[in-house]
Image (spheres, rainbow, N blue to C red):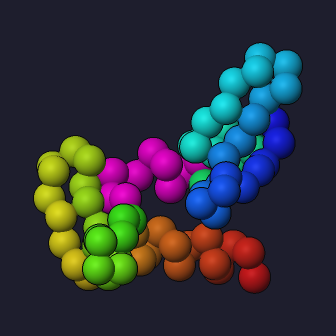
Amino acid sequence: WTEHKAPDGRTYFYNNDSKVSTWQKPDELKTPSEIILDSFPWKEHKADSGRVYYHNTETKESIWTEPKELTELKGTFLHIAL
């Protein structure tokens, strides 16, 4: 897998062996923290206005403030990194 930039600035990934391109970062390139975050139901998104919001893929709930569980999980990663 190699990382590239599309003309519009978005990042994409290309696998030279399989000739596959994807907008999603392949698991093989993810850090352990990224893999854990991917399995977490809260996902961070950006509204058209540029404002960040959070969506829970299990409950379908969307909120403007970072969920406590996500904040705690990120804090755990930061603590481990230090």
How far across and how far down the image is residue 81, in percent? 74, 75
Q: Which residue is outermost to the top?
A: 18
Range covered by the magenta-colored residues: 35-43
Rendered position, 24 above or below 16: below
| Residue 68 in view of the camera | no
How far across and how far down the image is residue 63, in percent? 19, 72
How far across and how far down the image is residue 17, in percent? 85, 19
Q: Quadrant of the N terminus?
A: top right
User: Residue 33 appears in which quarter of the rendering?
Assistant: bottom right
User: Residue 34 appears in which quarter of the rendering?
Assistant: bottom right
Report the side of 46 relative to 62 (left or right).
right
* Residue at 69% over, 73% down: 80
How far across and how far down the image is residue 69, in percent? 34, 69
Report the side of 1 relative to 23 (left or right).
right
Which of the pair 68/8 is nearer the observer? 8
* Residue at 76% over, 21% down: 19
Q: Quadrant of the C terminus?
A: bottom right
Which of the pair 2/9 is nearer the observer? 9
- Asked if the stretch drawn in magenta spans residue 36, the answer is yes
Rendered position, 28 above or below 43: above
